[in-house]
Amino acid sequence: MRKLKCLLLILSLFMPLTQTLGQASTSRDDVSKRAAALLAKMTLDEKIGQLNQLFFLSMLMQPEMLEPGIREGKIGSLLFVTDPATINRFQKVAVEQSRLKIPLLFGFDVIHGFRTVFPVPLAMASSWDPALVERAQTIAAREARAAGIRWTFAPMVDIARDPRWGRIVEGAGEDPYLGAKMSAAQVRGFQGSDPSAPGRLLACMKHFAGYGAADGGRDYDSAYLSDSQLYNVYFPPFKAAVDAGVGCTMSAYMNLNDVPATGNVFLLQDVLRKDWGFKGFVVSDADSVGNLVTHGFAADKADAAVRALTAGVDMEMSLPRSPVGSAYSDSLAQLVKEGRVTTAQIDNAVRRILEAKFKLGLFENPYVDVSAVASHHNTPEHRQLARVAAQRSAVLLRNEGNLLPLVKGDAKVSSVAVIGPLGDSKRDMRGPWTLADDRRTSVSVLEGIREKVGPGVKVDYAQGVDMDRVYPSIFALFGGPRPAPWSEAQKLAEFEKAVALARSSDLVVLVLGEYEEMSGEAASHSTIELAGRQRELLEAVAAVGKPAVLVLINGRPLDISWAVNRVPAILEAWHPGSEGGNAIADLIWGDATPGGKLPVTWPRSSGQIPIYYAHNLTQQPESAPEFKSRYWDMPTSPLYPFGYGLSYTTFAYSNLRVSKAEAKLGESVEVSVDVENTGRRAGEEVAQLYIHQRSGSASRPVHELKGFERIALAPGEKKTVRFTLGKPELTYWSSAVKGWVQEAATFDVWAGGDSTAALTTTFRVVR
Ligand code: NOJ
C-alpha cells in the first residue's frame, strides 16, 4: 500500500493532478486544443448534430424514438431525462455506437432543488442571504448530478417589476443590486470553482434579456426597454453571472424593442460577447429559433436558423413533435450549400459546445453511477438546509399586538383550526419548477403544525374553498391532475364547515394564496387578487374573531389589502419547498424568528402595477403639490415597501456616518451604521444601504440599494455594519451620454431596515 502511494506521488510529479485521478484536464488551453482536434474530424452533419438539443419526456416518448438519431450523431444534447438508467442508456449509444463517440450533454431545469425542494427563487431572494442561496444550489447541484444531469437551466435572473407576470416567482425580484448578488451566488453554488468536479453542474443564466418586462405582465409578450433600463436595471444580474464564470446563456423568447432576443445581435454579440467577454455557449429557449418566424422576423424556418446562428445562438432547444421542427437540423446543411451560412459560423458554435463537454469532463466520465444515486437524495442534511432556507425566506408582514410567536404548551391554545385551500397541500409547498421530486415527501402546513404542537393540541383542517383554474396541460404531466371542482352543494357545505371550525377553535391558521402552477411559465394573471372565493373565506373566518394568523403560500405579491387591517398576523411563506410545513410551524411557535425581507415592492392592488421603489421623482411643483405623480383613488405608496419585513424583536439604527464628506471621482467612501436589537428576543436584521445622486447628466432613482448585510443580534446587542461605496456603486449608464459615467454630485445615503429608511447623511463627489 505504502509503495503504491509512493508510486502515485512520483507519477503525480510528472502529470497534472487531475489526470492522476482519472479526471479530465479542464484547463482552457487543453479544452480548446481537444475541441479543435475533434472538430477537424467531424462531418457537417455531425457538427449540426452537436447544435441540436431535444426534449425527452418519458411520459410521452420511448427511448427508441431518439436512439437512432443519437447513433447517427444527430443529437448533441437532451433535456428532461431525469432517470439515471435512461441517461446511461442514451449515453451508451452516443459514446459506444456513434462514429465519433461524442457524449451527450444532459440538461434539466434544476431551479430550486431536485429531489429536495428549496423555496422558490423569489423566496430565496427574500432571505437576503447569498451564502444560503449558494449552499442551497450546491445541494441542488449535488442531487441532480448524482442522477446524471450535468447542466442546469438556472439561474433565472430576470428582473421583474410586474407581479402579474407569473415568472416573477423564478427570479430575485425587482432590484438589480440584490438580483446581481443572488445571481452570482447561484452560479457559485451550481458550478463551484470547476463544473466538472463531483457534485457540480454547468449553470445557464436566462432569459437573456429583458424577458421580465413583458407588456402587461403577459408571459412571452414584447418588452420595450430603454438602454438606460437595460444597462442599469435588467443587465446587472446577467453581468454578475458572467463575472462569476457562468458557462451558458439562454436566449429569451420575447422580442426586445421589436428584435427577438433569439436573433438579437445587440444582445448576443455586442453586449454578451464583446462588452462582457462571455466565453461559454448560448442555447435558445425551447423552440425560440423556429418562433422567429412567428415574430414576423424571419421569413421561414431556414431564415430563422440563419438569423439565430448569425446572432450567436449556438445550440437550438426543440420541443418534441414541435410544429416548427428543429430549424437548425432541418436547414443548416442546405444553408451551407447555398452559402447563406458559412462553415466557420457553424464551427464556432460547435467548438463552444465541445469545449463545454470537455470542460465538464464528459469524455472521461460519461456515465452515472446508478447504484449511488439514492444515497445523494433527500438526505437529512439536505432536508435540514431546506427547512432553514424556508425559515430564512419567510417574511413577517404584520404582527399586531405581538400575537406571534405562540408559546408551545400555552393552555389558551388547546385547539387549532387550519383553514384554506393550501392548508393541507403537500404539492403546493413546492412551487412551479419541481419536476423531479416526489411530492409525497413534502410537508404540508397541517402536518408541520401537528408535528410541532404534539398530540396534546387538537388540530383540525377545513379547506373552505376550492380554486378551479385552468393552466397549461403540461403541468398535469408533472404535478398530476387537480381534483374535480366542487359542486354547488359541496361549496356551501365546505365553506360553512370552515367557519364552524374557526368558531370552535382557539386559534386559526388561514393558509391562502396560489396553487403552484398559478405562477411560473405561461401563468400570468390580469390581477393579483386572491383567486377563487378565498377573499370571502378570509372575511368570514376573520369575522369569527378568533386570534388568526394568515400564512401566504404563493409565487407573487397578492392583493391582501383587506387583511392587513383585520388579521393580526401575516406571514409570507411563498412556496417554501419540501420542508415548508415544518418551517412555518417553527416560525409560528418561535423555534425560528422571521428575518426575511421583501425583494419586491408589494402593491395595494393590481391598479398600482408596475410599482417599484427605485423610480425617479419628476414633476412636483412646490406651489401646486397635487400636480405630481399620483392616483386620486388610492395612495401612491405601496402596501409594503421593497426591503420590508418584521421580526419578533425590534431594531434601531443610529450613528450613520461616511468616511469623508468629499471624495474625488474614483475614490471610495466608507459608510457605517450601528444596528441594535432593542427587543427581548434574539433576531436577525437585514441592514440596507440606499443612495440617491442628486444631479447629473440624467435623473437617478429616488433610492437605489447599494449594500446589505443580514446580521444576527442578541437582545440588547449592537453591531456596526460597514459598506463601501466605490466606483461600481456610484457609476451608472447615462442615456444623455450613451455610456457609463461617474459624476461629480451630492449623494444622499440612507441606512435602515427597508427602502423607506429615514436615517440619512450625504457626501459629495468632486473632480
Ligand atoms: C422554457 C422556459 O422558458 C425555460 O426557462 C426552460 O429552461 C426551458 N423551457 C426548458 O425547460
Image: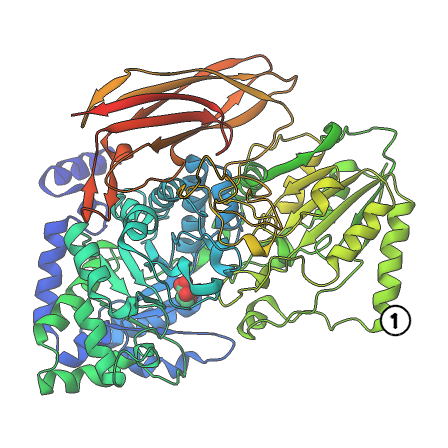
Quadrant for ligand 1 reads bottom left
For residue 104, above or below residue 369? below
* Residue type pointed to by label 1: Ala
Picture coordinates of residue 245, whole percent (x, y)? 25, 47
Picture coordinates of residue 202, whole percent (x, y)? 31, 54
Q: Pick whichever, 355 or 157, lies toward us.
A: 157
Q: The N terminus is located in which quarter? A: top left
Q: Pick whichever, 749 or 729, lies toward us.
A: 749
- Residue at x-position 33% and y-position 53%: 203
Q: Is residue 99 visible?
A: no
- Residue at x-position 33% and y-position 77%: 295
For residue 397, above or below residue 687? below
Can you tell which quarter of the image residue 130 is in?
top left
Picture coordinates of residue 337, whole percent (x, y)? 10, 86
- Which class describes the residues within 10 Å of circle 1: few (<14), some (14-19), or many (20+)? few
Q: Is residue 485 left or right of residue 118?
A: right
Q: Which residue is mark 1?
A: 489
Picture coordinates of residue 697, whole percent (x, y)? 23, 40
Q: Pick whichever, 240 or 665, lies toward us.
A: 665
For residue 190, above or below residue 249? above
Q: The C terminus is located in which quarter? A: top left
Q: Pick whichever, 603 or 492, lies toward us.
A: 603
- Residue at x-position 33% and y-position 61%: 367
Can you tell which quarter of the image residue 404 is in?
top right
Element assignment for label 1: helix
Can you tell which quarter of the image residue 193 is in?
top left
Q: Is residue 688 left or right of residue 569?
A: left
